[in-house]
């Protein structure tokens, strides 16, 4: 069997392969990339890993076979392993396999601290603090708009926004609820009730550029490919739904081509795209120096009204669906092929 590469999936997606019910994972694109590169994909889930072998679905000759094989030399991790038992399985796999993107969810404050230590990327970071009521009050005295967000979540869940309305009142926005106008004292109490004992962060809000009155940001796919080099595979715009403060498509946002958004905002489209790509590569290469195995990420980047670039979030398991929604087919395919090229590079090492 030639050049076997493991692809680790969540159990639900793994079990859905035969019925083509694999969520956002477009499994056939891994298969096509593997065939093109002379490789054999072995689909696995953490629950089926043992010390020396793994039970998985091998795709060869246009069909899947359930097989037990030795642990593959290289594995692309697409599973979310947040529980202790799944972490134990992943650790077991990592003893025999080079697992890239082994960790694919990071605490936002941890990422912020790593990047803040690098002067060349610190300019792209909005001011951020670990949440406490005292820090919130200080931030409210310093900034006119803030986000209070969970430090370890995704798809915009739990994000609150504060905007100063006058000397004493703030607009409080949360989830899909109607914004409230509350006093400074009331809003601090309200936010503390919602935070509770969870880990949250306070972040200076970026005055994002807008499209038809709605703020937008960008999702950038940055991956390692041939020779292990980082590359930007694509940029997609995400426009917040009317009246919302988050741009996530899962929260009603719309996908738009970045060129259209840049032109609407009066930016030079080509120049802005190059600047975003350069910043994205700089950010990811900086993180890779501190996070071994990082290889496949999606960055959320904001551009403010003056064209300044700011990092919003680093996603360790980019779902890539913005490119599919925009019919950016070549880019979408490339986001599956590039990790396979990196896997082939590792196999040769």
Image (cartoon, grey):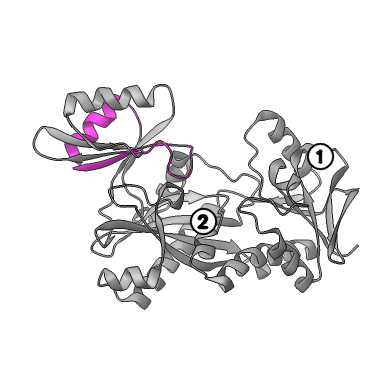
Q: Identify residue for label 2.
A: 298
Against 81, residue 26 (above or below) is: below
> Can you name the residue that lies furthest to the left here?
167
Part of the protein shown in magenta: 131-160
205 lies left or right of 278 = left
Disc 1 packing (10 Å; few <14; some 14–19; many ≥20): few
Query: At 49% across and 64% down in the image, what residue appears?
Result: 281
Contact between labelled residues 2 and 1, with CB atoms less than 8 Å apart = no
Disc 2 packing (10 Å; few <14; some 14–19; many ≥20): many
The secondary structure type at the circle numbered 1 is helix
66 lies left or right of 328 = right
Image x and y of residue 155, in percent: 47, 45
Against 290, residue 60 (above or below) is: below
Q: Nearer the viewer, mark 1 or mark 2?
A: 1
Q: Identify residue for label 1.
A: 48
> Can you name the residue that lies furthest to the front here?
19
User: Toward which corner of the image does residue 32 lie, by quadrant?
Assistant: bottom right
Q: Is residue 149 magenta?
A: yes
Query: At 70% across and 34% down in the image, what residue appears?
Result: 86
Image x and y of residue 67, in percent: 90, 50
The secondary structure type at the circle numbered 2 is strand
Q: Quadrant of the C terminus?
A: bottom right
Query: At 40% across and 48% down in the image, what residue appears?
Result: 116
Camera-side residue: 296 or 60? 60
């Amino acid at each position: 069997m030639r050049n076997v590469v493991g692809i680790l999936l969540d159990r639900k997606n793994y079990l859905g392969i035969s019925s083509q019910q694999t969520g956002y994972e477009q499994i056939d694109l891994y298969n096509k990339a593997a065939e093109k590169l002379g490789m054999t994909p072995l689909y696995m889930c953490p629950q089926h890993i043992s010390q020396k072998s793994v039970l998985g679905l091998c795709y060869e000759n246009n069909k899947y076979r359930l097989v037990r094989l030795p642990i593959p030399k290289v594995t692309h991790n697409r599973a979310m392993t947040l529980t202790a038992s799944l972490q134990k399985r992943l650790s077991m796999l990592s003893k025999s396999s080079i697992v890239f993107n082994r960790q694919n969810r990071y605490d936002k404050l941890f990422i912020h601290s790593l990047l803040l230590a690098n002067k060349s990327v610190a300019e792209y970071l909005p001011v951020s603090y670990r949440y406490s009521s005292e820090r919130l009050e200080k931030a409210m005295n310093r900034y006119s708009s803030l986000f209070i967000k969970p430090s370890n979540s995704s798809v915009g869940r739990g994000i609150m926004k504060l905007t100063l309305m006058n000397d004493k009142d703030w607009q409080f926005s949360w989830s899909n609820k109607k914004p409230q106008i509350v006093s400074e004292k009331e809003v601090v109490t309200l936010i503390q009730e919602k935070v509770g004992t969870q880990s949250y962060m306070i972040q200076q809000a970026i005055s994002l550029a807008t499209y038809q009155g709605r703020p937008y940001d960008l999702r950038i796919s940055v991956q390692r490919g041939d020779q292990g080099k980082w590359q930007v595979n694509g940029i997609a715009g995400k426009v917040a739904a009317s009246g919302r403060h988050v741009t996530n498509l899962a929260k009603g946002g719309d996908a738009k081509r970045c060129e259209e958004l840049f032109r609407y905002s009066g930016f030079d489209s080509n120049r802005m795209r190059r600047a975003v790509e350069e910043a994205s590569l700089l950010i990811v290469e900086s993180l890779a120096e501190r996070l071994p195995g990082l290889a496949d990420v999606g960055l959320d980047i904001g551009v403010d009204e003056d064209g300044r670039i700011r990092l919003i979030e680093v996603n360790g398991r980019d779902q890539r669906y913005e490119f599919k929604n925009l019919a950016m087919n070549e880019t979408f395919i490339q986001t599956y092929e590039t990790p396979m090229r990196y896997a082939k590079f590792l196999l040769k090492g």
